[in-house]
Image (tube, coloured by chain):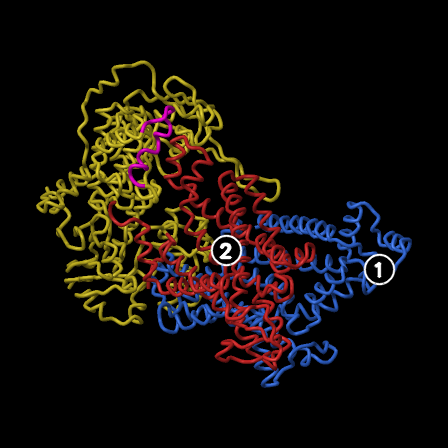
Amino acid sequence: MLNYISKRVLIGILTLLAASIVVFIMLEIVPGDPARLMLGMNATEDAVQALQQQMGLDQPLLTRYFSWIGGLLVGDFGKSYTYSVPVLNLITERIAVSLPLALISLFLSTIIAIPVGLFSAARRGTLADSGTMGIAQIGVAIPNFWFALLLVYVFAVTLRLVPAGGFPGWNAGLWAGFKSLILPSIALGLPQAAILARVTRSALLDVLGEDYIRTARAKGLSRRKVLYRHALRNALIPILTILGLQFAFLLAGTIIIENVFYLPGLGRLVFQAITQRDLIVVEGVVMLLVATVILVNLLVDLSYALVDPRLRGRS
Amino acid sequence: MSAPTEWQANISKAFSNRSFVIGLIITVLLLLMAIVSLFWTPYAVGSFDILGKLKGSSSAHWLGTDHFGRDILSMIMVGSRNSIAVALVSVLIGAGIGVPLGLWAAARGGIIDEALMRFNDLVFAFPALLSAVMITAVFGPGAINAIIAIGIFNIPVFARVARGSALSLWPREYILAARASGKGIARITVEHILPNMMNILVVQGTIQFSLGILAEAGLSYVGLGSQPPMPSWGRMLFEAQTMIGLAPHMALYPGLAIVITVLGLNLLGDGLRDVLDPKMRRERS
Amino acid sequence: MNLLEISKLSLRIGAFEALKGVDLSVNVGEIRALVGESGSGKSMTALSIMKLLPTGARTEGQIRFDGKDLLATSEADMCRLRGNEIGMVFQEPMTALNPVKTIGEQVAEGIRLHTGATRAIAEEQTRAILDRVGLPSAKFPLSRYPHELSGGQRQRVVIAIACALKPRLLIADEPTTALDVVLQAQILELLQSLVDEERMGLLLISHDLAVVADMAHSITVLRHGEVMDNGETAQILTEQTHPYTRQLARASMHVPERSPEHPHHAANNGPLLAIRDLSRTYPGRRIGLFGRDPEFTAVDNVSFDIKPGQSTALVGRSGCGKSTLARMVLALDRPTSGQIHFAGRRIDELTQNDLRPVRQNMQVVFQDPYGSFNPRHKAERLVSEPLFLIDRELSAKEKRDRVDRALERVGIPRADKDKYSHEFSGGQRQRLAIARAIITEPKLIVADEPVSALDVSIRAQILDLFADLNDRLGIAYLFITHDLAVARAITDTVMVMSEGKIVEHGKTDEILLHPRSEAGRALVKASPDLHKALARRIGEQG
């Protein structure tokens, strides 16, 4: 068990380190000098040089990498070139939108998909099964930003039940903030639910073909009991894998969905930062997202060990 | 020739599979549409008609016109070329690099295998869209960079699939027999391993193709895909967004084009898997 | 009234008629063997009784259990019967248990379901039954997971699940086929004693008459879904009135004719294969970042010779290291220490390229007639694969001639060259595998359990083929097997392997009659032997 955990943690740390190098190098080769961009076209050469010095841009590559990574470790993400505020402040402001959005979507996807998958698997081959899976098949094919547009048209433009976009801020009250996240969460979560429901069903059906299911049936368990007591837990590994992937996808999906709904989240921040060449912000946000994905993958790996005793090894 | 070969048996099985047939029809229609658009579209996609803008469906414009009065059907037809090209090339990049990597890792094992797995971890740590945004941020928006961004994400997918199925093939007795016949790793991989995983690769290719269509649409939607004046489904949706109250049809049709295309490819992939997957699903009560 | 009374049971799955009017009965306390080759419908009969048939299966006829017609019983009532009144043990112990639940949970589940016992009481009963099947909770706590147990131990858990509530009928579907002979004997003994204690009826399904001859009171022989023969064990086996029963019995005792004097032995210029102090160790599993389990020695300091034309058996229980040894001889694995000499040349250090002439003279036949061919190649290409080893380029005609000759030698018509392997039957495939092995005219064939996946009648034919090739072509064999009947049939010498060491080596007849090593004695004692069983039955009858 300890062996498995320590290996996963070590891999996670190494991956994060490698990712930081990739991010740093990629943004290093972006054309354009941030100091000149910040000061505008009319700035004098001296002023640009002075700013470069102040920002540490004149240092050798390795020095800059280590001072950046050293800063990240103590929570210092640097200072935004355009806003002249600490990047960390920008991120915390925006994460208050993106994280709830991703979590609500994931929650929606899970509580819809797993019961639907169980329902379908229990009725394999019936009309109910093929009907549900037909809908799921269509759901998988729907791009979330298009689904978002349809939702806006129906619920915001036509029925005027919810705002079409924008975010009043959590200061405007929990409900007002939540209300403006409803459509975005549905737009993000439902297509993912379709994927998860299909995975759940097929994982369950795979397990239902195993020999030990027959053993359980021979014990006198009914089909339903076998499904819940024996199949579900064994099907959890593929389900957890997809859940982990979905969280990464949802985090990135907020980049697009925030554009549809004009939400001031991390995605919009990255976008603005890229167009403004505010590279330090881009680096900070990307590293944060990558770290989150690695952490979630680690949690998924660890939960495998909870589900499957074979990964725990002999105690 | 002798009794029906595996191929003939598979073909007849395929055409009695509903998913496969529907998926195949949709896919063929999509390809036809793209090919026809090379020679003919109802209207030229560059022709503006400000007077006839934002019109709904009519006999002149089957799917209506956009805010510049361009014919939406023509734009969807031309846009399909873009979607197909980006998705197809990025699948080829992913398979072309990923499959050899996976085969190599499975055949050699040890440190090479471990290195590949860690490379996969690294690529998977970047959410696909995020890496696409970064790549296009560095190299600038455009179809080529969209292809690279999506293609890079396809590499570990194919590497993983190829590695997994190669690992399950290597212990087979016919591989051992080939080794006992003195054949080397490379030769066995080409003669025995690769041909026996083609089915799985074809199925995975179909899935990645449909994901590529979705990803391309997303990138063009945020302005990072192919640039104007080349029409693309994603950007049509972006332009429709501001008009959603006035002209919902502008959002409806390009979206349907994406859904139908992706649905068709997914059905084709499902059908292929049912037909080709050697792991017959055992049916028990 | 019989406990179980099946009459005119027919079963269709799609267009396939799996059972055609089967009659079968099991009395209280009776052990009824159901014997037949693969595809005879034995397992389908068992699943029909349990009503656990695949979807789309249609049954006709009657299955009366304790007077009640099971085919007319509702699913809810069947759930009450299964595990309570009728227990079932399956063939594959490695997959028959849920990997994510402890053995305690899995045994207790059925007890709680049927008796409504509290957790504590069910646990108490679980402990008792596990203890009864030979897994005392002091050594095997209820919190063990299946992957922490060996195959034989898992099969004991499956038996505990089936017998926990002392069912009146126990169905055991090839319960020992996946186990080696020593475990087989132990499991059969356990089943016998459980059945005797509780006066259960036992329906024991097997493909091999020899396995059931000792145990069963009565035998039903099944073929292609029809009952061929049926009656008391002693009567059926001694009289063998039915031609199919006779065929099965003969096949299972079959010893091929071999010319006593091997002309090839005469030319005695040194051994063909000489193994000296050969060892193979594997590093232990990693523990934490730096630690490791102790290393595992699969083959431990083994030495032996095989003369040209000599047929040698390497016998031992599963996991004794015999397959590792075979892989090293075939240069598919490298020894940790020691030497392998073939035809006077040391081969264990040769590069793959230098091994080519050696491989030409040393070929292999594997166990699984289904897995040993690339499904995408036709027979001609499959059989000709080793010709790759011949250095000079063969002309197309030469190649064809060689394939034709090899196919002829193994008795496969030339016309079948254009077939894919899946178009051949299991026995024909094993002939193909042998054709592939002899195409380079090798001096040694290493055969790893080459007949253990085959039905008895096919097995007899393949053994004849091996014997014939040995006689005609003077090919030496190294036969890896756990089945002493195979060793007896076609080998001159036997080596007994145990825990990586060769513990006994000598003439086949002597060792099989008078084994000296403990491992040898255990194997001989546990091997099912129809001859002995018959002799005993006749003795009983007086």
Q: Which chain comes out blue in the rendered image?
A: A
Give the image location of residue A108, x and y in percent.
56, 72
Compared to C201, does C426 lie above or below? above
Give the chain letter at badge 1.
A
> At which x and y percent is residue B224?
64, 62
Name which residue lies at 72% across and 78% down.
Answer: A168
Q: Residue at position x 57%, y 39% from top?
A: B111
- The yellow one among the chains is C
Query: Label 1, on which residue?
Result: A41
Screen quadrant of the C terminus of chain C: top left
Bounds of the magenta segment:
C378-395
Residue type at tag 1: Met
Please state the horizontal and vertical placement of residue B96, each as a whole percent of the image. Answer: 52, 47
Apparent colour of chain B: red
In the image, residue C539 above or below residue B130: above
Q: Give whichever of discs 2 and 1 has the lower sequence position.
A: 1
